[in-house]
Amino acid sequence: MIEELSGRDSLIHRLDPRVKIVLVFLFSVLVAVSDRFLVLLSALALGFCIALLARLPVKQLVGRLVPVNLFIVFLWFFLPFTFEGEPLFSVGPLVGTHEGVLYAARISIKSNAIMAVMIALVASTSILTLGHAMYELRIPKKLVHLFFFTYRYIHVIHQEYVRLVSAMKVRGFRPGTNMHTYKSFAHLVGMLLVRSSDRAERVYNAMLCRGFRGNLYSLSTFSLKSYDVISLVFMLAMMLALGVLEWTKMV
Amino acid sequence: MDEDGLMIHLEDICFGYPGRPSVLDKLNLSFYGGERMGLMGSNGSGKTTLFHIIMGLLKPSFGRIEIMGRPVKEEKDFREVRKRIGLLFQDADDQLFSPTVLEDVAFGPLNLGKSQDEAKEIAVRALESLGLAGFEDRITHKLSGGEKRLVSLATVLAMEPDVLLLDEPTTGLDEATEERLVDILKGLDVSYILVSHDLDFLKEVTFGITCMSNGTIVRDDERIPHTHIHVHEHGRYAHEHGRKWPHDKG
Amino acid sequence: MDEDGLMIHLEDICFGYPGRPSVLDKLNLSFYGGERMGLMGSNGSGKTTLFHIIMGLLKPSFGRIEIMGRPVKEEKDFREVRKRIGLLFQDADDQLFSPTVLEDVAFGPLNLGKSQDEAKEIAVRALESLGLAGFEDRITHKLSGGEKRLVSLATVLAMEPDVLLLDEPTTGLDEATEERLVDILKGLDVSYILVSHDLDFLKEVTFGITCMSNGTIVRDDERIPHTHIHVHEHGRYAHEHGRKWPHDKG
Amino acid sequence: MHISEGVLSPSVLIAGAALTTAGVAVGLKGLDHEEIPSMGILSAAFFVASLVHVPIGPSSVHLILNGLLGLILGWKAFPAILIGLALQALLFQFGGITTLGVNTLNMALPAVICYYVFGWGLRAGTRQVVFTATAFACGACAVLISGVLVGFSLYLTGEAFLPAAKLLVAAHLPVMLIEGVLTAACALFLRRVKPKLLEGQYVPRPSSS
Ligand SMILES: Nc1ncnc2c1ncn2[C@@H]1O[C@H](COP(=O)(O)OP(=O)(O)OP(=O)(O)O)[C@@H](O)[C@H]1O
Ligand SMILES: Nc1ncnc2c1ncn2[C@@H]1O[C@H](COP(=O)(O)OP(=O)(O)OP(=O)(O)O)[C@@H](O)[C@H]1O
Ligand SMILES: [Mg+2]
Ligand SMILES: [Mg+2]
């Protein structure tokens, strides 16, 4: 169930993960603070181009975008009606405004543009590589190692969880809206926590046996190639252009 | 064909985990009421997978399953199956999740719609029948390996199943507990399929032994005794003067 | 007494987990360099506990421990012990905690103060010696059970220990991996104590078998072969016409 | 619970990121290097627990359990939740980069508040009734505060979000009840099986040291 997106090979895959993280971050921030439709639509187009360049199957891309858009759809039920402005249409007693619709549209575009590049990033880089790249980008060491341990043991604990749920099923358990169900789930969660804390003790012991004294190491090294630099400069230029476009609106 | 009828009937079952070579390949199995079948097979031959398919925890990619004469396909059908067939998991730790033994054993009956009092009564009876009276308030997580195994068996028996599937019930048990299990199994009034690597144990508690290999069942109608040379744990009975320990003083 | 000297010497070790009957009771053990000792004992007899006491992960309530001729008592002393003695844990998931195989195997050498490059080199060599070349960038949680076990062994060997303590290294391995492990162990140039329930395996890879029971070591200096009657898995070689299956048509 | 990318205004995003950075810094400061492995494993357990879906009427909700997490980890809830949300973003694309700060704050701040408000009632020796009530209140309040914070983040972005924010808080009410019940039952489980977990700022250590 906890599956990463399929790894293929593409121009995006070969990009240095540090460059990718920096670009995705800057892109997300740029889109999040922009307001002008021209800028947002260009960003959306750019985002989808990147996702397609990562050779992400369109079906997977759309599948991943659906949950993101559920919250957006929820907002569409409110914003057109609650935003003050020029009336555009009406549903019964409710009046949708021109400004409200534009605002909701803006949010939808922003959200999808940012998510498209996020998905391209995740689909082209393994999560562990991202962790190593974050380490290189000066994210605190403690945080990166915490990330690694959490990711490592999610899989082990998830398997324990699946086995416990099977055992409940085999004994006729059918979840419903009742106390018995909630109590059983609470016991399941409690058992997971207890077993994890036991495991933590064993892992700590295993680390002691290998000389652990509080130091954690990361072995991966990245090197910037000319291809990375060119891509970085190119993308920065694109974003700068968008930024200028956004800024000129205000002056 | 009533009580002793065809309880479990599998036809051409195929199964593989995603991204792996197939585990079960056109497996056929007929299991009748009153039988006590031993099942052997090397590690990874798919014995556990087979049990999970019978219980509907895994879905075969191909093939037909009939339980007690009725074809079963969907989750809904398997819910009925799980009332009649009990599965003892390979790892007892996976089976127990309630804080106390009594709550864990009563979990099954509660799911079958029994009242709290009835469920408790059934649980107490199941525990007693395995010689576990007095264990009701013990914390499951703190039981020893052997105790966990016996309590797991109690949780399954509390469902009052017609057929038991026992997945390596003796791994991790010491000899005393294993003997106790032999006595318990012999005294039980249910049919079962039992997976074990231990031939001596299988010989004691089953009527015949079946083997799995290459994803299918290889049926041996005759059992074949033959001799093996073994090194015994204690040097009490017979002696062969072999190699001395390098640093022995005696 | 140098290389083949007394490596591990335990005297009157007593230990019990809080609120439980004692597990080790005046246990004595002498283990010499060059030895390969098999250790058997029923479940819960305290084999894992014994290993943990030797590594200083548990503190005995009474008794003396001497490693390589020096008495060890405090955490500081045991840090030295852990450089010389490697422990292979019962569950490989506890031992492989790093994201990738290379990082995991290099973890020990890095802690011993090796530089990044040295550590990498040692790790690559350890992996190669076990036939795991090319595994460096594999993700640990995606390894199969057998691969996890072998990589765990590589992590221990990368510490270049003089003595290995192996806790049930064959549980859950398929036959091919088990055979590979036998070959690896036979080819290793270290002494070890090996816990296993599998006599045939112990016979192949150790010089002698020692038993634990009632919290102490029962030493058998002589191995005692004796015969057992066994039922063979396939009916190919010898036949005894036993009971027919109740519902057999053939 | 997650606010999507692109919804919130820049000032809210920056404020959220700043407060979360501060919270994470406090959490990491109290975290010994040697405790990182154990903390990671416990965080993983909470991550898996948050994948559990419990039915409520015809629909189902996934567990949040930030009250329980706060009780067990204290300030360390901040880094634990930050990493949990980062992994959710990477694995399932719930939430994203720019909203990571706000989303972490909305979940972790209630956890820390509950740690201080309710922690005392869950230590050893509390009477069963008091213990159960405190645990219930802890689970329910953590979700309530989270819901209010989510609504507040939206409201700060623009007054037009007010009705949507109100509805979000209202939608948290049934979840509150379920979380309260589950937290109480789970805390009772831990009290019987491994009370050490409830001692506050817990990090598993081997028994010997
Ligand atoms: N969840 C899983 N995902 C992928 N592969 C699996 C999974 N479970 C089992 N397998 C693989 O399927 C094969 C059959 O496994 P199974 O557990 O059924 O064997 P088994 O006969 O019960 O073995 P054992 O004697 O070790 O219990 C093995 O090769 C195993 O590695
Ligand atoms: N952490 C613990 N707390 C309390 N009791 C424990 C703990 N670990 C082990 N025990 C108990 O101590 C006894 C010895 O356990 P140990 O694991 O050393 O046995 P073992 O010989 O390794 O058994 P196995 O063959 O099952 O691995 C058992 O009765 C066990 O229940
Ligand atoms: Mg199995
Ligand atoms: Mg052991």
Image: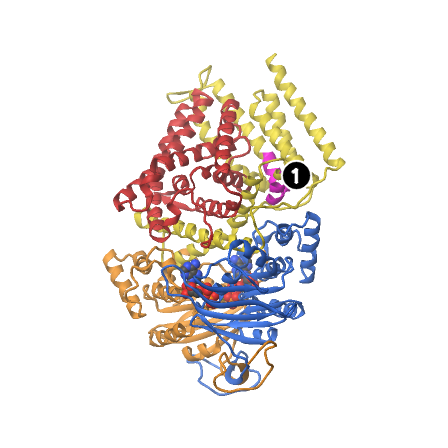
Chain colours: A yellow, B orange, C blue, D red
Which of the pair B39/A163 is nearer the observer? A163
In the rendered image, is residue B12 in sight? no
Chain designation of label 1: A
Q: Residue flagged by tag 1: what amino acid is it?
A: Pro
In the rendered image, is residue D187 in sight? yes
Label 1: element kind: helix
Check residue A121 for magenta coloring: yes
**What range is drawn magenta here?**
A116-133
Residue visible at 44% across and 26% down in the picture: D154
Q: Position of residue A20 (x, y in %)?
A: 65, 35
Q: How many marks?
A: 1
The residue singled out by tag 1 in the image is: A17
Q: Position of residue D49 (x, y in %)?
A: 43, 46
Name the quadrant of the C terminus of chain A: top right
Instruction: Say whether residue B192 is left or right of residue C222.
Output: left
Check residue A118 for magenta coloring: yes
Which of the pair C140/A164 is nearer the observer? C140
Instruction: Give the farthest residue toward the left.
Output: B117
Instruction: Say whether residue C136 is left or right of residue D71.
Output: right
Which of the pair A235/C80 is nearer the observer? C80
Q: Position of residue B78 (x, y in %)?
A: 40, 59
